[in-house]
């Protein structure tokens, strides 16, 4: 009796999943730092969006080549995970291919055959992805924000997948019994001859090693997500569910401002009257956003979900004309700051200690914010329903309403609106002159 | 040109069928005023009983809101809503997609609930009601490309109304590579119209003009006074004024119908 490997496997599994759960909890906590916003309406439409956009990848295929490759990797990833289920059960019970007798040779062989074909396709797709990222001159992968870690992250994921897929095939190729049975070894039979010259013991060792590295790799990958843009494989689902359902041109109206303006406009209101009890609390301490905690939890979820694909930036008029602004970078910086705040909370026993930094200026500059035309191209492009524009607008609001820090020309425009009801300096009394000119 | 105001109407005890929201550009900008007049000619031709607010109209607050000044936006909005509700306005039409978006989407929660149309939608209705016909001979065969305004297209998903009208002109509509959902902004939105662009290597309107010129048009059709300015400047910059004109769809229709 040899239980060592079962126990080892169990421990490995507990550690891997334990860390993962811990990481997810941290992400959840960080997202909850955001302000509340109601996204619980219209559940049916939300489910539909999630089914179409996240599950159905409807927006990915707008760019057919990368969309197609992505679907292969995605379908492969999801389906091959069924096999992981068997691996886990085998590992825990010390069995080998435990599903085989239950599913019957033919059906089991068919399933594994499908997995093998998918694994090969995923491998090819991932190689093509790597070439796109590193060899083809695709602008969105070459921007300044895609250097250093983000670039390495993108490639690491691809290497991960290449290795995992190879191990899966090797594992099958060196499983002598499986090869001899000859059902479902569609791809692995092509690889098996490489190992023919080895002794059956060596082959078995290779099989076991591949098996262990494969499952360990999967657990490592699971925990790698936390540090990676690859988190989208999980968060794309809630993110598309909680996406904005209103017309893209509709920006939310601040209720706190409405109250103030109504008070100002109401001729019967006594400006010197004492505020009603509790009224003080209705006035938010701050308009707009200068740090991550001023954003809504949906915006923070957006930041964690961003895949850094750069489709937004490649459609952004500001980015396309060489401005500092890149909507992808807005999302990446928001996530960077949020993770910094999260680490700060971890290090200080659960409370945030002021670090003298904020999202504004330390991460996102006013120059970036003022370059946006509010055209919604980024929002339209995003394959996972992220809204970079809403963050830009909230931060502009902070600049203008809290700091009066609009560019000079915009201050003039706003003064004109205030004084004569038009962004230019024309007399309100001349507003109908156009009708009599020709 | 006969452009009745709501105040006139009220004095006569009349309620027009629709309010024409002219917008700041349509009221003051020399190029955009022509669009306002062209649209009024169409309204007259279709015998639409309309009125404007005239001197009682004020900025919708769109630019202020997009510049980050929520306070000024809501001041403008609440003031306008008071006027509009005072006149019991139900239906509004405008040639400005920014006003269209703000009136339609951002006024309701502040108490201003109206049925709001972009002029291309409204003209489409006039046609389907048999009140207007577009002459398809005057401009026949001209090569036209259409620039989608962000606040009409992506912001409100109105892509077909302008295209339907263009086709009715009998012209040859050629799309730009980036169009409808993927259309590139002209560079004016989000209050950019009122400031210089940030440092970069190109102006957005030039890039968009290049998109348009690729479609080899004789006419660049627009549905927004700000886009119109941006594209007109772009064509001047490219020194193509003799070959390409920039016209609002309302202008094209009024021209085709000899109004
Ligand atoms: S809305 Fe702003 S950030 Fe988004 S694409 Fe347009 S200009 Fe770029
Ligand atoms: S915001 Fe969306 S489109 Fe932009 S990089 Fe992130 S995932 Fe891609």
Image (cartoon, helix red, strand yellow):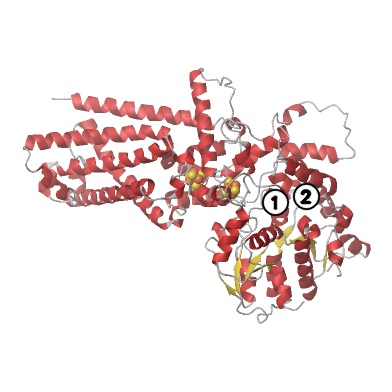
For label 2, the residue is A423
Q: Quadrant of the N terminus of chain A?
A: top left
| Residue B243: image location, x then y, percent | 63, 71
Asked whether the viewer can see residue A372, the reply is yes
Tag of residue A203: none
Q: Residue A273: where, in percent of width, then height?
A: 87, 28
> Viewer-proximal residue, B176 or B161?
B176
Total tally of numbered discs in the picture = 2
Question: Is A190 situated above or below A395?
Answer: below
Residue A50, x across and y down, in percent: 48, 48
Q: Which residue does the image show at 25% across and 28% down from the upper left?
A: A9
Helix, strand or loop at mark 1: helix
Q: Looking at the image, which residue is at 75% across and 48% down?
A: B61
Q: On residue B193, which mark appears?
A: 1
Residue sitting nearer the eye, A422 or B104: A422
Chain letter of the residue beneath label 2 in the structure image: A
Q: CA distance from mark 1 to mark 2?
A: 10 Å
Are the residues at dot 1 and dot 2 in contact (C-beta closer than 8 Å)?
yes
Task: Note whether ligand 1 is within 8 Å of mark 1.
Answer: no
Say if A7 sits above or below A127 in the image. Answer: above
Residue at the bottom extreme of this rendering: B137
Asked whether, in this view, residue B234 is left or right of residue A302, the answer is: right
């Amino acid at each position: 009796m040899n239980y060592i490997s079962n126990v080892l496997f169990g421990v490995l599994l507990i550690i891997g999943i334990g860390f993962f759960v811990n990481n997810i909890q941290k992400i959840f906590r960080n997202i909850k730092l955001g302000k509340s916003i109601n996204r619980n309406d219209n559940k049916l439409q939300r489910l539909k969006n999630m089914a179409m956009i996240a599950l159905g990848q409807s927006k990915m295929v707008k760019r057919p080549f990368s969309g197609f490759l992505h679907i292969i990797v995605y379908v492969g990833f999801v389906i091959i995970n069924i096999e992981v289920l068997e691996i886990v059960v085998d590992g825990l019970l010390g069995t080998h291919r435990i599903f085989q007798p239950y599913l019957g040779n033919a059906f089991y062989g068919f399933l594994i055959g499908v997995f093998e074909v998918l694994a090969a396709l995923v491998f090819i797709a991932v190689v093509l992805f790597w070439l796109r990222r590193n060899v083809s001159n695709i602008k969105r992968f070459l921007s300044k924000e895609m250097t250093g870690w983000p670039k390495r992250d993108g490639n690491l994921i691809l290497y991960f997948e290449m290795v995992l897929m190879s191990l899966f095939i090797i594992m099958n190729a060196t499983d002598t019994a499986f090869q001899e049975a000859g059902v479902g070894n569609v791809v692995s039979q092509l690889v098996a001859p490489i190992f023919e010259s080895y002794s059956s013991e060596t082959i078995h060792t290779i099989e076991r090693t591949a098996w262990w590295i494969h499952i360990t790799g999967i657990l490592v990958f699971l925990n790698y997500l936390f540090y990676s843009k690859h988190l989208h494989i999980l968060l794309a689902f809630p993110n598309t569910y909680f996406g904005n359902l209103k017309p893209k041109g509709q920006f939310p109206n601040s209720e706190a401002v409405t109250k103030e303006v109504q008070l100002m406009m109401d001729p019967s209101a006594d400006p010197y009257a004492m505020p009603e009890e509790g009224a003080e609390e209705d006035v938010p301490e701050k308009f707009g956003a200068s740090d991550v905690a001023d954003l809504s939890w949906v915006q923070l979820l957006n930041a964690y979900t961003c895949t850094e694909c750069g489709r937004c930036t490649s459609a952004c008029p500001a980015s396309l004309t060489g401005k500092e602004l890149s909507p992808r970078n807005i999302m990446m910086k928001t996530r960077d700051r949020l993770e910094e705040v999260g680490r700060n909370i971890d290090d200080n026993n659960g409370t945030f200690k002021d670090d003298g930094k904020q999202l504004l200026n330390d991460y996102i500059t006013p120059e970036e914010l003022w370059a946006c035309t509010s055209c919604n191209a980024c929002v339209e492009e995003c394959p996972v329903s992220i809204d970079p524009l809403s963050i830009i607008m909230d931060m502009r609001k902070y600049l203008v309403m809290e700091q009066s820090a609009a560019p000079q020309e915009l201050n003039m425009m706003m003064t004109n609106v205030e004084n004569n009801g038009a962004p230019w300096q024309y007399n309100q009394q001349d507003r109908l002159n156009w009708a009599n000119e020709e | 040109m006969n452009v009745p105001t709501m105040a006139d109407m009220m004095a006569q005890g009349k309620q027009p069928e629709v309010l024409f929201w002219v917008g700041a550009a349509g009221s003051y900008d020399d190029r955009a005023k022509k669009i306002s007049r062209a649209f009024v000619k169409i309204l007259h031709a279709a015998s639409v009983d309309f009125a404007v607010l005239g001197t009682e109209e004020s900025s919708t607050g769109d630019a202020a809101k997009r510049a980050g000044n929520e306070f000024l936006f809501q001041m403008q909005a609440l003031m306008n809503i008071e006027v509009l509700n005072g006149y019991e306005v139900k239906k509004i039409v405008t040639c400005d997609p920014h006003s269209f978006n703000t009136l339609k989407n951002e006024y309701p929660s502040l108490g201003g609930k109206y049925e709001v149309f972009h002029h291309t939608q409204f003209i489409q209705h006039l046609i389907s009601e048999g009140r207007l016909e577009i002459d398809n001979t005057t401009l026949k065969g001209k090569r036209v490309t259409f620039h989608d305004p962000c606040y009409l297209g992506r912001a409100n998903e109105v892509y077909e109304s302008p295209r339907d009208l263009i086709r009715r002109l009998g012209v040859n509509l050629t799309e730009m590579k980036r169009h409808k959902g993927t259309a590139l902004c002209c560079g004016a939105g989000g209050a950019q119209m009122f400031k210089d662009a940030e440092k970069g290597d190109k102006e957005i309107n030039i890039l968009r003009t290049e998109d348009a010129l690729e479609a080899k048009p004789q006419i660049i059709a627009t549905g927004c006074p700000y886009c119109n300015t941006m594209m007109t400047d772009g064509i001047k910059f490219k020194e193509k004024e003799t070959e390409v004109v920039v016209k609002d769809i309302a202008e094209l229709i009024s021209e085709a119908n000899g109004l």
